[in-house]
Amino acid sequence: MKSEDTRNLFLAIALSVLVMAAWQYFYAGPLYQREHQAQMEANQANTAAPNEAQPTGAPTALPPGAPAAATPPGAPIREAPGTVSQVLAASPRIVIDTPSVGGSIDLKGGKIDDIVLKDYHETVDPKSPNVRLFSPPGAPDSYWAETGFVSPAGAKTPGLDTVWTADRQTLTPAQPVTLTWDNGAGLVFKRVVAVDDKYMFTIVDSVANSGSAPATVQPYALVLRHGRPTVGGYSVLHEGFVGVIGDGGVQEVTYANIEKAAKHYDVNLAETSWHDLGIHPQKNR
């Protein structure tokens, strides 16, 4: 390659880097800052302060034999929208208190849906709100962990409206919490929730049958998230779901395609086909 061609090549590279840097500095950077600031303001308006006292309420139990809600695992929880504080106050709760996380467990459904990270803030300002990881159903950006049982034989199992009893008011690294529910027909369900001094939760579900007839139940565990996150809309950045499906390798699905498929077919997303979402598992990329 001639020296003149080499010089032109390096000049073109330098100009390209300059253009990209200018685009990032004058357009992408300010756009991101505006969107991030707007999201922060929305979170501050809708999210309770991390040091706000969490309402715990006295744990209560359903009367023996009360029917459990026949709600399939992972089904959307229909609740009137409200702020995090309003939703947390609507049901009895167990406080979570560790050096790393705070929050609560909802005794209605026995789900972990209120987690705040004590060591991390939304911005570099130490007075900014702590990062909220889990948010209860009915609040903005709902995000929670749910475990439970289903019974193909029709046995009564705890549902999303089941109110569990608890053996203590606070979950700490030194003190696990045991939740209990009696279905009134011989089955007693127990859920032991433990947490370490970092971020690891351990949930052990069990069931004891004191009745005369055999019962068949199957456990499940889900992490669910409702709502669509704020995206930047960058053409060079994928924002959505990423997964490896079949022989197709890495697949990227945008939030728009997910919403379009769900609205068009009016079905649970778990039942939506790959093709509906624009995924072609047999096609190598």
Image (cartoon, grey):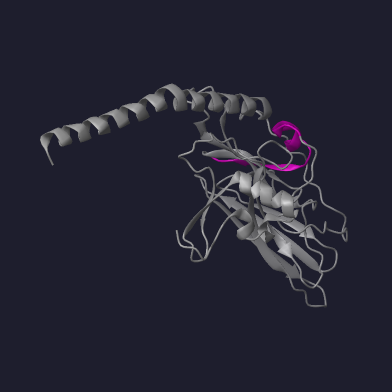
For image coordinates 50% across by 28% down, the residue present is: 32
Query: How many numbered marks are there?
Result: 0
Viewer-side residue, 92 vs 222? 222
Q: Position of residue 9 (x, y in %)?
A: 21, 35
Left or right for 159, reference 253: right
Above-or-below relation of 64 to 125: below
Does residue 19 show up? yes
> Is residue 22 toward the left or the right of residue 177 in the image?
left
Residue furthest bottom in the image = 213
Could you tell whether 238 is left or right of 74 in the image? left
Nearest the eye: 81 or 217: 81
Q: Which of the 4 image quadrants contains residue 74?
A: bottom right
Q: Nearer the viewer, residue 222 or 63?
A: 222
Q: Quadrant of the N terminus?
A: top left
Residue 184, placed above or below residue 61: below
Q: Residue at x 59, y 44 (%)?
A: 172
239 in magenta:
no
- Please provide the residue range marked out in magenta: 82-98
Give the residue at the far left of this rendering.
3
Residue 83 percent coordinates (x, y):
72, 31
Verify whether residue 89 appears in magenta: yes
Q: Quadrant of the C terminus?
A: bottom left
Q: How far across and down, in percent of the image, does residue 107 sit? A: 74, 48
Q: Is residue 166 visible?
A: no
Task: Quadrant for residue 275, please give it.
Answer: bottom right
Q: Position of residue 133 (x, y in %)?
A: 58, 40
- Toward the viewer: 223 or 4? 4
Q: Is residue 60 positioned above or below 233 on the image?
A: below
